Image: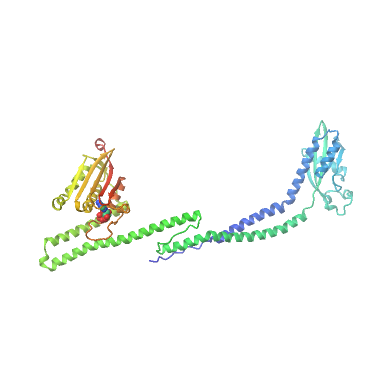
């Protein structure tokens, strides 16, 4: 039957999500680049300049008092490309001690004494340190601006000025350091153009990459979805592939497993319906047929025909009650009602049911027991198990007609074994005989006695008790069906 596919609300597809995510990521990268490379370029550049001046100051301080201080100062100024002026302060009055110039457009060599005093005062008020970014036109009085030789556009100059105050051997020094700040506008403009191209290229690459990723991810998913639709439509042959990706491989394995399980369940369901209908219909047909014969033909109204009707009715009610038991056991609605009883006595009682069979049909059913064996279990259920196992042994023992039931005790458990000398069970089907309606002999004929549910009930009952069970069988030799239950000590039982 073709099941309608219920379509849920349409969600955003993987492709759209991938494209959006990658574009967002690219935007984040671009914004970071723009901020750090373009927006904050001047800030980082100036920070580096001030750090450089600081380093230079440290080197200068180390040479205070040296005889060759002037040469050292000059060396520092030349190597760093900066200008320095050193003042010694006594009684609040500064006197230039030394000076070095690396370039001609130096600002600190051209400013007035007042401005120097002002810078000194700022440093003094700030723990001996003062950093200043000084622009020519904004900061300097007009007359000071004209002291710059060779400058036509004074605003071209911006400097990083560091003022430091140091006290060495009781003397106070003021050091003025100056490094010209190169205008970065041209560099920033170049970077902006570059940034535009980079942004464009990155966005296109992100788009292409997202589409490529989508193909890689979506191809296996689309294939799996396609096959899953086939599976949903009842085609259990669908073989899911993993395309070499671990996660998809796991999904494919799960789906393959589900497909196998659904197929097996479907198969079982069909078989079950076929078998049940067959099993129910056959006795009903017989009952109906024989009843009609007995009604219509007075000569046939005999005990023999009545017995057939009774047998078929019994068979029918057995089948129905077996089916009921099994359904309840499997659904978990029937739970074992535990009581302590002697399983040896129970088996002995069961054997009595076979007396007529032994007397009239020549069966030899031996029962060997090691004596009283108390167990804690559901008496009725265990009786059903013993009965089913002996019944099967009788049905399948073949021409030898011999069945041996034995009860042995060891290490706190009692083991009940039912052995026959029948055809045995082939190793390849031995695990399946416990399944519902499984028959080694696939031909579902009347000659086969039993409902096909016996071992399935045995399995369900024993599993509900947590008991060990199994079968040892050899083709042409026979089978031994067995199960074990823990023994209960007599004093504990009371
Ligand atoms: P059935 O009503 O057919 O006996 P069971 O569930 O009791 O159903 O058994 C399932 C199948 O297991 C049987 O059809 C038979 O093929 C196999 N089987 C069960 N008991 C024996 C046995 N003692 N010897 C050989 N085959 C057996």
Q: Where 280 sits versus 144, above or below?
A: below
| Front residue of this view, candidates 404 and 81 | 404
Residue 231 appears in view: yes
Residue 453 appears in view: no
Q: Quadrant of the C terminus?
A: top left
Q: Residue furthest front?
A: 476
Left or right of 431 on screen, residue 54: right
Q: Residue furthest left?
A: 299
Q: Quadrant of the N terminus?
A: bottom left
Left or right of 191 on screen, residue 279: left
Question: Residue 81: image x %, image y %?
Answer: 82, 45
Q: Where 23 sits versus 344, above or below?
A: below
Question: Residue 45: image x %, image y %?
Answer: 75, 49
| Front residue of this view, candidates 181 and 211 | 211
Q: Where 7 sits versus 367, above or below?
A: below
Left or right of 59 on screen, residue 415: left
| Residue depicted at 63% across the width and 56% down the height | 26
């Amino acid at each position: 039957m073709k099941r309608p596919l219920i379509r849920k609300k349409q969600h955003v597809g993987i492709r759209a999500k991938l494209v959006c995510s990658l574009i967002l990521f690219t935007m984040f990268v671009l914004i970071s680049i723009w901020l750090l490379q373009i927006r904050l370029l001047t800030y980082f550049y100036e920070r580096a300049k001030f750090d450089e001046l600081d380093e230079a100051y440290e080197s200068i301080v180390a040479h205070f008092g040296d005889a060759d201080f002037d040469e050292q100062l000059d060396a520092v100024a030349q190597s760093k490309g900066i200008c320095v002026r050193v003042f010694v302060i006594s009684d609040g009055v500064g006197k230039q001690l030394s000076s070095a110039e690396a370039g001609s457009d130096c600002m600190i060599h051209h400013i007035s004494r007042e401005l120097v005093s002002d810078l000194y005062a700022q440093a003094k008020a700030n723990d001996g340190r003062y950093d200043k970014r000084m622009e020519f036109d904004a900061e300097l009085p007009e007359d000071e601006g004209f002291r710059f030789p060779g400058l036509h556009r004074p605003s071209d100059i911006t400097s990083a000025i560091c003022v430091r105050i140091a006290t060495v051997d009781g003397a106070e020094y003021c050091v003025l350091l100056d490094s010209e700040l190169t205008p970065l506008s041209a560099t920033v403009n170049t970077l902006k153009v570059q940034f535009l191209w980079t942004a464009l290229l990155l966005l296109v690459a992100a788009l292409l990459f997202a589409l490529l990723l989508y193909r890689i991810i979506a191809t296996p998913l689309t294939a799996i979805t396609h096959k899953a639709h086939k599976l949903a439509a009842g085609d259990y042959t669908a073989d899911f592939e993993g395309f070499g990706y671990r996660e998809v491989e796991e999904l494919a394995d799960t789906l393959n497993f589900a497909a196998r399980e659904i197929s097996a369940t479907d198969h079982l369901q069909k078989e079950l319906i076929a078998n049940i209908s067959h099993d129910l219909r056959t006795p009903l047909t017989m009952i109906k047929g024989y009843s009609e014969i007995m009604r219509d033909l007075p000569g046939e109204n005999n005990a023999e025909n009545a017995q057939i009707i009774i047998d078929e009715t019994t068979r029918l009610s057995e089948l129905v009650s077996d089916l009921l038991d099994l359904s309840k056991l499997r659904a978990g609605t029937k739970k074992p009602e535990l009581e302590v009883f002697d399983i040896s006595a129970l088996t002995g009682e069961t054997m009595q049911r076979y007396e007529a069979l032994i007397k009239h049909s020549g069966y030899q059913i031996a029962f060997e027991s090691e004596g009283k064996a108390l167990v804690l279990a559901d008496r009725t259920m265990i009786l059903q198990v013993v009965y089913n196992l002996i019944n099967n042994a009788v049905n399948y023992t073949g021409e030898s007609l011999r069945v041996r039931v034995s009860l042995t005790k060891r290490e706190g458990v009692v083991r009940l074994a039912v052995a026959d000398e029948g055809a045995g069970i082939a190793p390849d089907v031995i695990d399946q005989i416990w399944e519902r309606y499984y028959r080694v002999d696939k031909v579902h004929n009347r000659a086969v006695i039993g409902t096909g549910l016996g071992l399935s009930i045995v399995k369900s009952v024993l599993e509900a008790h947590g008991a060990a069970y199994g079968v040892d069988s050899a083709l042409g030799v026979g089978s031994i069906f067995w199960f074990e239950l823990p023994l209960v000590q007599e004093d504990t039982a009371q």
